[in-house]
Image (cartoon, rainbow, N blue to C red):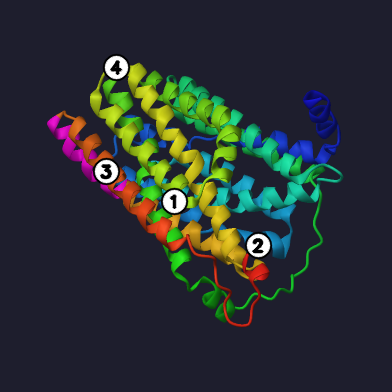
Amino acid sequence: MYLRHLRNQLAAIPFAAWIIIGGQFLVGLGNVGPILSIFFQGSLELRVLEISALLSVRLWSQRGGAVFAGIAADRFGARRTMVAGLLIRGASNVLLAVATGFPGLLLGVFLMGAGSALFTPASKKALLGAAGKADPVFLLSLRNASRNLGFAVGPTACLLIAASSMRLALFLAAATSLVFAVAAQGWAPADAVREQRTSWHPAVAVRDLSNRRVLLLFCALVFFFALYTQLEFTVSLVAEATYSRSAVALLWISNAIAVVLLQLWLSGWMARNAIHVVVGGGLATFAFAFLLFALNLGLPVFLLGVFVFTVGEIVVEPKVDDELARLLPSRSLATGFGLLGFALSIGGTLGYYLGGRALDVASSAARYAPMWLAFGAVAALGAATVFMTFRSAFARPLEAPSGMPNDEVAG
């Protein structure tokens, strides 16, 4: 019965939607983000603080630009914006491959983030525009599965190619973006280019967002992403220094497998439990993962820590997004998501800076366990704080703002 239902859902997907879904695999395949820190340190011999600055710029241009990218997709059309994002993303890889100084690298990572910012919301809108009779929820789930499969293969392939030439890996990553851009331009559905009239107004958005619960969600995401960035930064660098470059490939394979295996199963658990349980529990898994890193019991235990870390990655951000959708009316929801993207930018910047400082100290002493224990203690304290604060703040029914019914608040 299930297989028949799945076959019917797959058969209902139009060709244009398959182009976008398949392109998500190419995007993941050409994803060099997880190994940039290794390229900057190993091939270019940059200092840790220079690396953290470059990664922070990429993060800010991607996360901070998400709101403007969504506006661009609505204003100029999803296909046009998506293709522009892919071309900019490809150009950034070429620039990183040929750059000879820090300014060139800085521009390269900025363009990489900006291209991703343009691509992501536009590709979602284009996919839904090509849905036809297909189930939109199933389409988005299939999109995520395709992307995660690419993420599982991409960093590993890049590392294998980078063993002979990191610049070759960057050129090939640029080629994946170009191939998808050509396919999308040829077969993705074109949008009518028109300016949308909505009920959005700055004063209304400020009023909708000015409540304690939105502020708590904002702070939780800042804290969450400051810890999560350690997986891409300090965890990757320590894995290479302690074990080998192939260990970094295993790290990202472990992360991708965990996402693919646990995502659907954990979505049911997330739906059944309140936000204080999900977000607090997700941060607690970070604390446990850092403890496993600190034990220094070999690569299998280190990879187990990555697997545990991934549980927190899977549950926290989607649950926060879901809660925000319940809090805000539709007129301010996109602004709210943009605000949460801004929170991720702040958290990522803090994470890269603090991680860089901590890694400098740990590397000079040749002891990483104190750094992991410190991160674990911070994560545990944050988990307890979120659990208690959110349990109190989100326990009461939401009161509608003046002049607005509750069903509109629920969004």
Mark closer to the chain start, 2 or 4: 2
Residue matched to label 2 = 72
Residue 276 badge: 1
The residues colored magenta run 352-365
Q: CA distance from mark 2 to mark 3?
A: 34 Å
Compare residues 254 and 362 and report the one nearer the observer. 254
Position of 325 with respect to 108 (left or right) is right
Looking at the picture, does residue 409 appear above or below residue 238? below
Indicate the quadrant containing the N terminus: top left, top right, bottom left or bottom right.
Answer: top right
Q: Is residue 363 magenta?
A: yes
Q: Position of residue 261 (x, y in %)?
A: 56, 27
Residue 298 badge: 4
Residues marked 4 and 3 touching at CB (< 8 Å): no
Mark 3: amino acid: Gly
> Toward which corner of the image does residue 4 lie, by quadrant?
top right
Position of 332 with respect to 209 (left or right) is right
